[in-house]
Amino acid sequence: MLIDHTASQGETRAALGRACEHLLSLQDAAGWWKAELETNVTMDAEDLLLREFLDIRTARETEGAARWIRSQQRADGTWAKFAGGPGDLSTTIEAYVALRLAGDSPQDPHMRIASVWVREQGGLQRARVFTHIWMALFGLWRWEDVPAVPPEVALLPPWMPLNIYDFGCWARQTIVAISLVLAHRPCRPLPFAIDELGGDEPWEPPRKKSAWGRRLARLDRALHVYERRPIRWLRRIAMRRAELWVIRRQEADGSWGGIQPPWVYSIMALHLGGMPLDHPVLERALEGIEDFIIEDERGRRLEACQSPVWDTALAVIALSDGGVPGDHPAMLSAGDWLLNEQVLTGGDWQVRRPKLAPGGWSFEFANDYYPDVDDTAEVALGLLRLEHPDRERVSAAISRGAAWLEGMQSSGGGWGAFDADNTKRIGRQLPFCDFGEVIDDPSADVTAHAVEMLAALGRATEPSAQRGLTWLLAEQEEDGSWFGRWGVNHVYGTGAVVPALTAAGMSPSDPAIQRAIKWLVAHQNDDGGWGEDCRSYDDPAWRGRGVSTASQTAWALLALHAANDRSSATTRAVRFLVETQRDDGTWDEPFHTGTGFPSDFYINYHLYRLVFPIMALARCLEAQSA
């Protein structure tokens, strides 16, 4: 019996129409799109801990957050870093302590099973550095057993062998703020202990395997000695300069970089330095957090970040692919909003590119210090789709963005997200840096989007794009895929690179492209979709393996379409998207397919399940009709 894996053009067009209609309905009156950016319960646990530290925690906030945290507990008593993932020790510890704050008893069944699991994994002693810092704030861990980060690091100039500008912007902001917190070593005891989370073995500093790692471990021990008796005048200067550095980087919405880690540590750092909570800086900071809170019937949760510029650019591209005219009111409204979001002021990126004029776009509503290449590329691609009445304004904005993007190219030919040549890998080996990626080296996905943008501007043969192409081809994995830095993972990287290569003029029959397509086809699931588990960042056996999702299936389809694939792999994937679409035009996707830090922090972008399937279905329909 033959099984029909093909969705008719009529079925596909109907699915596309429903999806576009649903996406249009989500647009804000101001012109932007923004869907939930879901991460894991450490955000909610740390929000409660922050409020406890500042003595501003309320019963309403506590109850809502606790209800959400309980709802995310796995059957084995743990909490995971991503949907469907294994239990994570630090995430489980932080969730457990937050529930203790909420009044849950260690004897409650859900708490007892969690504490037993924590002990089996080695207990609090084996948690990450950030978890140890949170526990030390409340007297539940010794400050002496936290790696040293003296605020004097803020005094080191950019030409020093290792300084704050050698870290990615997210790590840089966090490190400066944490250095101030560690200098104060506060202790605000809780009304309970957490002895039930202690492991059998005493804590020992992690052993470093590399020679540099061992040297940095010795440096950490020396810094601990210095911390006992710092040079007083130098410490005063360092703390003041670090505080000013933090204050100057507060964004208009009260955040720091629009992301949770530097935000919460900056609040604590400034408050510990004597700034009252009713000071305008801290008032803005605390009020801004409220705009990142989502409350519904499931509870209260905090977004680690918000993605309106990214979401809006992708929505414009998707709707354009779906047939929405470039002069449609929704498109023009989105275009006007994006034009107003272009960053025309300086930022930390100027440390490495001091003569480069601004012109990029950021990810968030307010993040003028840290525009990024990825958003700039996608915004420019979106603006090119518009039939805007003020064409000169659009053209000027795109030209500024393209010039800034080209100037941010790293010396090797690739692009990082926020900085150029942020490639000093020694930072990864610091004892303090176990919380995720700390540098912003070039990645295949960001470089692909940059090349695709340059190609759309007719500049594919120019040196910048050609250097990017050369870099991409050199980065192809032996199996034919590309690593995905900001999306999970090889499906994302491959889905970004193949369209960029063909847009830049490479033939679909090129061996590099055909190797990529062969890898994709080999990893298609039996249901016609693609999925890749976040564990692929740690275990190669998970590359291209996982439950099929709408976004990852769409990424694979975008690559297949770019390569002119007309095989059953494409038709089966289209059928998967058509058959799994919900009645309201979107798709269910509980899994995290976005990446914050590989191996450590993952994101479920709630708009990915809609914008990428629209692009994929629309482009495949166009190919069928050609």
Image: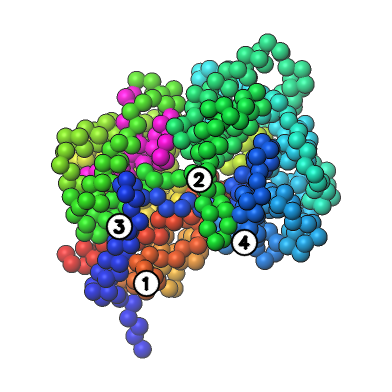
406 vs 602, left or right, is left
> What mark, if any, has residue 583 been given in the picture?
1
Mark 2 — residue?
A: 292
In magenta stretch: residue 360: yes
Q: Is residue 277 above or below residue 30?
A: above
Q: Is residue 473 left or right of residue 463?
A: right
Give the farthest residue toward the top. 233
Question: Which quadrant of the structure image shows residue 528?
Answer: bottom left
Label the magenta part by its dominant secondary structure.
loop
Q: Are marks 3 and 4 in contact (CB under 8 Å)?
A: no
Name the amino acid type tagged 3. Leu
Provide residue 510's location: percent of width, then percent of height. 29, 53
The boundaries of the magenta stretch are: 356-384
Residue type, numbered disc 2: Phe
Kindly identify which residue carries mark 3.
24
Q: Which of marks 2 and 1 precedes in the sequence? A: 2
